[in-house]
Image: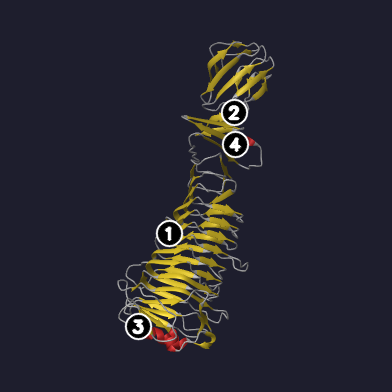
Amino acid sequence: MGTVKAVASGWIDTGLIKVINVLDFDAVGDGSADDTAAIQAAFTAAKQETNGVTVYLPAGDYLADARLATLTDSDPRINILGAGQENTKITLSGNLSNPLFSITGSAQNAHVVRFTVSDISFRNPSRAFTGNIFDINRANHVSMTRVYFQSIDGICLDLEEVWDSVFSDCKLVDSGNATNTQPMLKMVANDGDDVDTGCNHIRFISCQFEEPQYESVQLNKHSVANTFVACKWHGDNPAVNNDHLVLDDADRNQVIGCAFQAGGDNYIQIKSGSTDTMITGAHFRSAGDVAIEITDGTRTMIAGCTFTVNTTASVRITAGTLNVYGPSNKSADTKVIVGSGTLGVVFGYGRLYLDEDFANGFTPSSPGGGADNLVIEEDGNAGLSIVTPSDKSGTILFGDDSASNSGIIQYSHSADTLSISTGGGAFKFNSREILRANVGTIASPAGAQLILTGGDFFSITGTNNITSIATASSTNGRMVVLNFAGILTFTDGNNLKLAGDFVTTADDTITLICNGTDWHETARSVN
């Protein structure tokens, strides 16, 4: 590719590509002269070429008050090149014909190919212009590098059916239009095509989306397999309370290593059946409501993200499915609010909070290092499955973590053994108690019927004989050990199925198991 030279006039033929300098067409670039006609003339000349051509704007401030170019798939490959986004500026001086640049392929199989823009900025300080800067419809291998959009009172990049393209080091600031519900960047399908195809395989690398006047980015209608890498979203506008990245019927899109900070209602909203969204290694701080809102999304995956000081929660899901994999902030809390969606969690560090009703069930597992904490608030009425890792331990808390430990289950997993204990209350499986707090003290009853409270080991004091155990205590599968403090007769009969009467002395024990009605002796010990 040839070398671009800053010359006052004439054409530069490098042998590989031609460069047209707008100064050759009487552009001034002094910030006061109207350069619209000169830039239009440069593009008209570029369209006469048969091979690729670059329209070059040297350093300067070029005023424009009308559309600068309309390019189609019948035109040669055209590049727009400035001398740096801080050096070459196009300033919009009026309410122009929308958009500033129109790039349109004539059909789904007739795209504009390899349109590029680099090292230039577009500014709208008066906010008189309320249209779009680039409308790119049916194009592929588009490339934009170091392009800066500031105070655009409309859409900076309106992409329809754009494929296989790259936007790197671009910056969109203080743009969009809340009145017209226009984001700074919009990616949609072309409704005119027979096949409803959206924007596919577009990469945004190290781009910045700051101070949106409406939403920052929208991916709508079958936008598939697009990726945001190391991008930054930043609010800084307390009057604007909208989402930063909206995935609306968009599939297999990825957010990798991005940062979201300050303002916004939700940083990311996933809705309208969007599937297989992957969010990895991202940082979310100070969301106005929740960091990630899933109102209708299938198989959303969140991995290795950090969440800090988000107002309501880190993630809220009301429909769809979500998997969370090991947030990397070991000390911070992560709160997930679950509505009617299904949640599967593999959680590494920190504490995970869940609340609301998750009617479709919940299956968390915890393979990551360190002690894990899972806190479930309100209803978990569809069941809970905990998969614990080898050589790890943790705590499962049902109810309010500020209350007593009556809802705690503690587990440790070492080699082939999983040990589970409760801090109090019963742990039941299919309505059968399989675990209960292990200490209780009961005086032998005057009425000869023993009433067992919570627990599985009881110290029986007093000398009154015992002839039965209360029906309310007789849970199918329950096993208890009775330790006697003195002399009494534990009588065979009624619902006590013993190997004969047991006349106790101090520290004697008997072990019983219940079938739901009767208590059967399994062992006795005379000490």
**Would you name the residue on which mark 4 appears?**
408
The amino acid type found where label 1 is placed reads Asn
**Would you name the residue on which mark 2 appears?**
472
Q: Residues within 10 Å of mark 2 (few under 14, many from 20)?
A: few
Badge 1 marks a residue whose secondary structure is: loop
**Would you name the residue on which mark 3 appears?**
47
Asked whether, in this view, residue 87 is left or right of residue 55, the answer is: right
Distance (Cα) linking label 1 and label 2? 56 Å
Q: Are marks 1 and 3 in contact (CB under 8 Å)?
A: no
Q: Nearer the viewer, residue 108 or 196?
A: 108
Q: Nearer the viewer, residue 435 or 449?
A: 435
Q: Are marks 2 and 4 in contact (CB under 8 Å)?
A: no
Badge 3 marks a residue whose secondary structure is: loop
Sooner in the amino-acid sequence: mark 4 or mark 3: 3
Sooner in the amino-acid sequence: mark 2 or mark 4: 4
Q: Are marks 4 and 1 in contact (CB under 8 Å)?
A: no
The amino acid type found where label 4 is placed reads Ile
- Compared to residue 117, the image places residue 345 above or below, namely above
**Rendered-image quadrant of the N terminus:** bottom left
Q: Nearer the viewer, residue 101 or 472?
A: 101
Badge 4 marks a residue whose secondary structure is: strand
Looking at the rendered structure, which numbered label has been put on residue 253? 1
